[in-house]
Amino acid sequence: MSERVRTDVLVAGGGIAGLATAISAKEAMPGVSVTVVEKYTSGYSGKANRGAGIVVTLGGYRPEEFVQYHTDRIGKYLNDQKFLMKFAREIDNDIEALDRWSKGKLDRDEKGEIRSIKWRSQLRGVSGDGIYDFDQDNEYPWRLAAIDLDYLLEVRKTAVRLGVKFIDRVGIVDILKTGSGEACGAVGFSIDTGEMYVFEARAVVLATGGQNYRVMPMWACGRGEGHAAAWRAGASLANGEFSSFYNWTSPHNFKDEMGVEYGLYNDKGENVGLRHTIEPHPDIDQDSLAEYYKQVKAGNGPLHYHQDENIMLPFTRSMLGSDAAYFKRPYTNRWWGKLIFNGATQEPDDIIMPGLIGEYGAVKVDEEFQTCVPGLFAVGEVSIGGTRCFGAVPAPPARVRGIALNVMTFHGRTAGPAAAAYAAGESVGASAGSSVGADAGAVASVGAGSSVGAGVGASDGASVGAGDGSSVGASADVGVGANAGVGVGAGVGANDGSSVGAGAGAVASVGAGSSVGAGAGDVWAGASIDAQAADIEKRFGAPLERAGDMTVNDFAFEIAKVVQPLGNSLYRSEARMQGALARILELQGQVERIEAKTPHHLFGVNENVAMLLCAEMFFRASLERKDSIGWFLREDYPDSPEKLEWIVIENDGGGGPRIVREPVPISEYPYKPGQQDA
């Protein structure tokens, strides 16, 4: 049994990047049909509502100041400066769009102005009524604003009002292609029943999130399936060697901590982190993490966190749960207040360790977020590194806390209109809002309020978004082992009463094997969709037909044991990375050991396969870079590179990797090494 759905633009993933893409596509071209397919429940899923809800605003600084600072101090001239400038010019427009879509969820002061604060401001004092007073005079050319964490529900409602269709509880696993190589849809499966969904689309947008390897529970939902789908479709990867973001955490609760390096002590009582905080120090740095590795290897562990020496603590806690919170966000302050309290009650000592967050997002895209596969776009964390926008750092957070929400919104606001235009270019004579005959090859449209097809896959308010938020802890090669944690599950979701067929250009859903509009100009003609779908179904469902001796979580733990250690993924060496790559390749040969009895297990197998692919490509790119720059550290190659180059991994056509070194066109960019010092 399967469902078949046709749409102009298919968005895989209903987090903030997917929602921004869908909304922007409809705002740009209302007559184009857009369908969002989300593995859990859009509005609750993804990572955008799990963090601090902080966004970046220029706050009076010029885009050029932001670009120059980031390129010189953070990205180390590996930035695509044209891309970064395009992003910087839209920073304030992006947060205004986010505020509009969320119906005013950005925090504003008594005058109605967006409330903001300089990053890493220093506390000068506390007023009698408990309000913190900050010295905001520092060198960072940006400010921070805040949005309440229930904003995604309102953003989804905006998408519904614009006519975007939602199909929840269905995960996309592979891309469909025409005989000439264009993306023409995707195949997904219900996570509850295993039913197959075949989506025929004129443009496909991956908004499936990054790869976080299920180590840190807060970010465990990033499983990297979009990378695997893009790779199997023929896409390339770029800048993946920088995708090893770590944050400080307690081995007892796995709660993120910022500013630990200011009070980082070895077991001899020596502060070993402070020397790594010399300005500029916009965020956690690679050198203090490498110091942790060196100290433990030298026998000076475990390491300890003296909170009273963390100069950032008043700043971070005033932004989050506190009676004296700088930002006034009812939902967020309750949420973070409980999280901080619960975390504090689970810290019996001051032992601290690095926890891998990862943030592998290497699908290579152009400035309109199209991959090298025509018709296949990638937005959000799946492609943030692949833009090369932020240079020699893991992105997000690109060493600019809060920038992730800006980035996801920018990606969607750029890719949405581009994908809609691509889809419209394939249409035949369909003007905005018009109804086109099915024999003309256009997507069938119907009148408002009517419904099309039987058994449409979209939920009607009864969907429960109990996301698989489980995470697997990892034992580091140095320091204290990390226990298993449980991530944050998605809540109950609704489809806001939307129905398929609401408005012109709505998606028509038909039974398996049927077709709509297979006439002249049909992009799907000759695409062998049924044969491709059958192959994908066979691959995805194969684990049900074999006996396994490992659970999904146990297998994920084996992957985490390879990628978590600092010596493999941050302070790297040839021998350690070769050993790590060999173990990943060994695990790739053992996937058949994973036991699968339910659709959830099948998705777990698919996620493990994606984790293995991302880990493989991370280590291959890391082995290729024989220098140290920005976040990327080689113990055996400590010197800066002689040439500025991006590491690109192309698909050789047979699924194998081909590594290309692409020169950074620094002569074409406004900011060049040494220019700041001149």
Image (cartoon, rainbow, N blue to C red):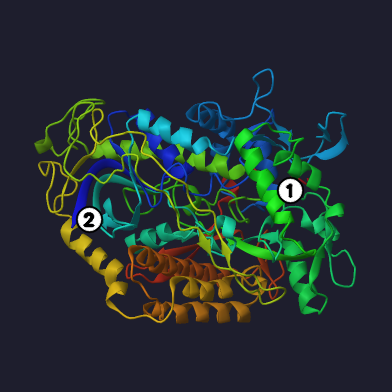
Regarding residue 673, the answer to whether it shows in the image is no
Badge 2: residue crowd in 10 Å (few <14, some 14–19, many ≥20): few
For the image shown, how many numbered marks are present on the structure?
2
**Residue 180 - label:** 2
Q: 257 above or below 267? A: above
Dot 1 falls on a residue whose secondary structure is: loop
Q: Quadrant of the C terminus?
A: top right
Camera-side residue of 210 and 576: 210
Of the residues tagged 2 and 1, which is closer to the observer? 1
* Res. 95 image quadrant: top right
Describe the element under mark 2 as helix, strand or loop: loop
Amino acid type at image mark 1:
Pro
**Residue 287 appears in which quarter of the rendering?**
bottom right
Outermost residue toward the right in this view: 269
Is 664 situated left or right of 527 in this image? right
Q: Residue 330 location, x and y as percent?
A: 63, 33
Name the residue carrying label 1: 282
Screen quadrant of the N terminus: bottom left
> Can residue 534 be seen at all in this image of the molecule?
yes
Most foreground residue, 106 or 628: 106
**Residue at horizontal 39 percent and vertical 80 percent from the top:** 593
Does residue 658 lie above or below 439 as drawn?
A: below
Mark 1 is surrounded, within 10 Å at the Cα level, by few (under 14), some (14 to 19) or many (20 or more) other residues, namely: some
Q: Where is residue 50 in the image (x, y as percent from the top left)?
A: 57, 47
Q: Which amino acid does label 2 sit on?
A: Ser
